[in-house]
Amino acid sequence: MNFQNSQHLVDFMFSYYRSANISMNSHCQFEIQPVTISKQTSGRKSLLDKYFDFQNDKALLKEEQSSAKRKMYMKHYMQKRRECSSFRERQNRCCVESKQKARENLEYKLKDRENNHKRIKKARQCEEFRESELKAKQRSREEIETKQKERKNTLKAMTKARQNKEFRESELKAKQRSREEIETKQKERKSTLKAMTKARQNKEFRESELKAKQRSREEIETKQKERKNTLKAKTKARQNKEFRESELKAKQRSREEIETKQKERKNTLKAMTKARQNKEFRESELKAKQRSREQIETKQKERKSTLKAMTKARQNKEFRESELKAKQRSREQIETKQKERKSTLKAMTKARQNKEFRESELKAKQRSREEVETKQKERKSTLKAKIKARQRKEYCDLEIEMKRLLRKNPLQLEKERLKKQENRKVHRQMERCRDKLSKATKRKTFALVDHERLLNKKRHIGCTIDESIVKFHARVANGPIYACSCCHQTWFRKSVVQLDKAHITLESRQLCTDLTSVDGKQWLCSTCLASLKEEKVPKLSVKNGMLWPKKPEVLNLHPLEERLISQRIPFMQIRELPRGGQLSAKGNIVNVPVDIQPTINALPRQVDEKHVTIAVKLKKRLSHKSSCFLKTFAPRLCSKL
C-alpha cells in the first residue's frame, strides 16, 4: 500500500483498529509489513484517500460536538462558582495581576488600546450608549479624585506628545485659530480665572507667583509687552461709558487713601525723572507750562494745589525745619532778598486796594500785638532796622530833629514817661521770671535746699540759743492784742497785716468795720485777707453776721458770785505744762446742771437790798471747817440775774 505521508499511515492504523473493534489494551500482537510512502502526482483521488477524508470529517464533527458540550458545561459551572464572593475576589485579583504583568509588554499595551478603541467606536454608534457614557463622565468628574486622575493622565499624555515637534506646531496653530473666536477667548479667560483664584488661596503659590512676576518685570521686553497689553485692554474698555464712570469713581476712592497717593506720586516722579533726561521733552514741557500759566484759571489752580500741598507738608516738623533752613540760606543772598521784597510789596499793594483786606489786616495786627511774643519780635525787628539805619549820619540827624519837635508837645512827654514805666515793669517781671527759673533749677540739688532751710531757720529763730530766746520774748511780749477789723478776733503780730499795706480792691475794703487796735491802725488777719484778695466775703466776718454780742456790766462778777448763779458746774482736770508754766485741760470735761432757785430763796429779802451786803462762804462739804471761797456781795445783783 502506498501512503502520502506518515500521518496518513497513523490515521489508517487508528481507523483500522477502531473499525475491527480491537481494544488498545489487549495483548494481541500484529506485524506491520514494510510500507513505502510516495507522493501521488495525479489529480484523481483513490478510494483510500476518500476513506481518509471521510474519517477526518467525522472526527472533526465529533470534536466540535464535544467542545460545544464542554463549553456549555463550563459556562454553567463558572456561573455557579462566581456566585461565591470569595471566588469572585480571588478571580478579580488574579485578573488584575495577570493584566499588570501583561501590560509591562509594549506589544500587549498597544493591542489592548486598539481593541478598546475599536470596542468603544462600535458602541458609540448607539445613541443611548453615548448619552449614558456622557452622564457617567459628568458624575465621575464631580468627584475630586476622578478630576485629579484625569488631569494627571492628560498631563502625562500631553508632555509625551509635546516632545514631538510636529505635534507642538499643530497644537500652537489650533490654539491660535480657536483664540480668534470670541467664545473660546471668553471660556479660556473664565477657566484661567477660576484656576488662578483656587491656586492663589495657597500662600506658597502666591509667593512663587509674585517672585516670578518680579523676575519677569526686570526684563525690558516683558515690561513693554505688559504695557502694550494693558494699554490695548484699557482703550477698548474705555469706549464704554459705564466703565469710564466706574473707573473714575474707583480712582477717587483710592486717592482718598494715603498709601495709594504716595504710590502714585512715586510712580509719576520716576516716570518724569526718566522722561526729563531727554532734552526735547524738557523743552516741550517748559513751553507747555509757559502757555498754560498765561491763562488765569491755570494760575489759580496751581496756586491752590501748591497751597494745599504746602499746608499738608508743613504739618511735619522735619519739613518745616528743612524749609526754614533753605529760606535762611537763600535770604543770605542779596538778590533773593530783593526779589522777595519786590514780590511781597506788589502783592500787598494789590491786596490793600480792597477795603475788607485792609480792615482784616489791621485787626490781625492789633490781635497779634496783644500777645507778648509778637511784641518782642516786632521790637527786635525794629531795633535791628534802627541800628542799621543809625549807621548813617543823615538818619541820625533827622531822628534828633524829629524828637526835638515832638517833645515841645506836653502830651508827647507824658507818653514817653508812661512808656518808660511800662518798660520798667516788664523788665522787673522778666528779672523775676529769670530768678524763679534759676532758683528752680538750682533747687533740684538737695544740698542747696538744705542750705536754704538752714538760712530760713536762722533768720526766723536765730543763730544761737540766746538770740532765739530774745526773739521769742519779743514776739510774745504784747500777746494777742491785734484785733482784725473784719472778724473782730484778736491775733498775734505775726498773723496780722496792716490794712493800708494790703493790696485789695475798694469793694473788698467795704467789708471792713474801721476797727482800730494797736497804734490806732486797722489790722487784717491772714484768713480774712486771703478771701478778700479773691473778692469773697470772709466766713467769720462781722458783715457776714458773725458778730460777738457785747458783755453786759452786770456780768462783771467775782468768781464766788459766778459760782452761785451758774446753772452748770464744769468738772475737768487742769494741769500745768512742763515748759512755760501754761495750763491745759486733760481728759473729759463734764458739765453738771445745778438748780440755783434754793440759793436765791435762802438769801434774806426783808433788809433794804440796796445798801446791804452779805458774807458768803463756799465749802466743798458742810462738815468742813474751812471754805474754798469767801466773799461779801449784794443781794440786789442776784435778783437782777
Image (cartoon, rainbow, N blue to C red):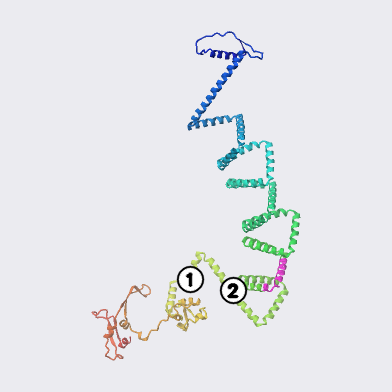
Q: Is residue 586 left or right of residue 329?
A: left
Q: Which residue is mark 1?
A: 456
Front residue of 34 and 226: 34
Kind of element beneath mark 2 = helix
Secondary structure, mark 1, is helix
Foreground pick, 588 / 280: 280
Q: Is residue 390 shown to the viewer in this render? A: no
**Numbered label attached to residue 426:** 2
Residue 597, percent across and down?
28, 83
Q: Is residue 351 magenta?
A: yes
Q: Disc 1 or 2, which lies upstream in sequence?
A: 2
Q: Nearer the viewer, mark 1 or mark 2?
A: 2
The residue depicted at 72 percent of the width and 72 percent of the height is 392
For residue 636, side relative to residue 333 (left or right): left
On the rendered image, what quadrant is the C terminus found in? bottom left
Kind of residue at badge 2: Val
Which image quadrant for residue 19?
A: top right
Cα distance, mark 1 to mark 2? 30 Å
Q: Give the crowd class for mark 2: few <14, some 14-19, many >=20 residues within 10 Å.
A: few
- Magenta stretch, main secondary structure class: helix
Name the spot of residue 305 as percent of width and height, x first: 67, 62
Q: Which residues are magenta?
A: 337-358
Q: Quadrant of residue 489?
A: bottom left
Give the camera-side residue of 454 and 464. Answer: 454
